[in-house]
Image: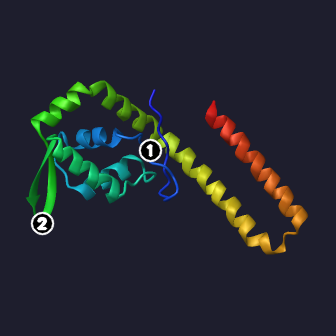
Amino acid sequence: MFRMHMKFNEPWQESPFQKGDLKYVILDLIKDKPSHGYEIIRILEERSHGFYTPSPGAIYPTLQLLEEMGYIEVTHQNGKKVYTITAEGKKFLAKQEHFAEGIRQQMKVCWSKENTADIRETMIEIGKLGRLIGRRVRNIDAEKMGRIREVVSKAYSDIAAILEQ
C-alpha cells in the first residue's frame, strides 16, 4: 500500500507523494494531453480539491528530469513550454503501470470529496481552537495555560495514536 501525506498549502507540511512519485503523476497527466507546467500545477490542485498545490520548484525540476530521461519533449506554444510524453515515456509508464495505478488509487482515496470535506472541517476546528487561545492568551494565567497545554498535548497524542493505527 502506498502512503500519502495530505498537504494543506502550508510550507511546513510534507508533499503528498513519496520521493520519485511525482514523475509518474506528471507522465500520467500529460500522456493524453500535452500541458505546460502551470497547467500541471492547476490540475493537481483541482484534483486534490485545493489541499495540494505543488510548487514550481517541485514541478519544473521533475519536468526537466523527465526530458533528460527522454520521457517527455518540449515544444513552444504562445511563449510557453508545452510538455508532451514521448513513445519512450509511454513505454516507461506502461512498464510501471502497477506502480502508477497504485499512486492514482491512493490519490483518488485521499482526495475523494468525502475525505477532503472531513479534512477541511477538521482543519477549520483546529484553526478555531488556535484563534480562541490566541484571542485570550493575554488574560490566561499560568495555571490555566498549563491546563490548556495538557489538553492540547493529550489531543495531539490521541490523534497521533489514531494516525498510527
**Which comes sooner in the sequence, label 2 or label 1?**
1
Instruction: Find the distance from the CA under tag 2 to the CA under tag 1.
Output: 31 Å
Q: In this view, does 90 lie to the left or right of 147?
A: left
Residue type marked 2: Gly
* Foreground residue among 35 and 153: 153
Mark identifier at residue 118: none
Instruction: Specify whether residue 33 is in view.
Output: no
Q: Return the x and y of residue 138 as percentages of the image width and height.
A: 80, 75
Residues under numbered marks 2 and 1 in contact, where contact means CB atoms less than 8 Å apart? no
Measuring from the top left, give residue 99's x and y in whole percent. Answer: 33, 28
Against 94, residue 74 (above or below) is below
Whether residue 55 sits left or right of residue 38 in the image: it is: right
> Which quadrant of the rendered structure holds the C terminus?
top right
Question: Tag count in the figure?
Answer: 2
Q: Which of 121 and 88 is in front in this view?
A: 88
Across and down, in percent, residue 40 comes to 27, 52
For image coordinates 21% across by 51% down, the residue present is: 64
* Residue bearing mark 1: 16
Quadrant hosting residue 144: bottom right
Q: Residue furthest right?
A: 143
Q: In which quarter of the image is residue 139?
A: bottom right
Q: On the rendered structure, is 103 left or right of 110?
A: left
Write down the residue under mark 2: 79
Classify mark 1: residues with Cα within 10 Å, few (<14), some (14-19) or many (20+): many
Q: Eyeballing the image, is 94 above or below 146? A: above
Q: Is residue 147 left or right of residue 159?
A: right
Mark 1 element type: loop
Name the amino acid type tagged 1.
Pro
Could you say where residue 44 lies in the image, as x and y percent from the top left?
Answer: 34, 49
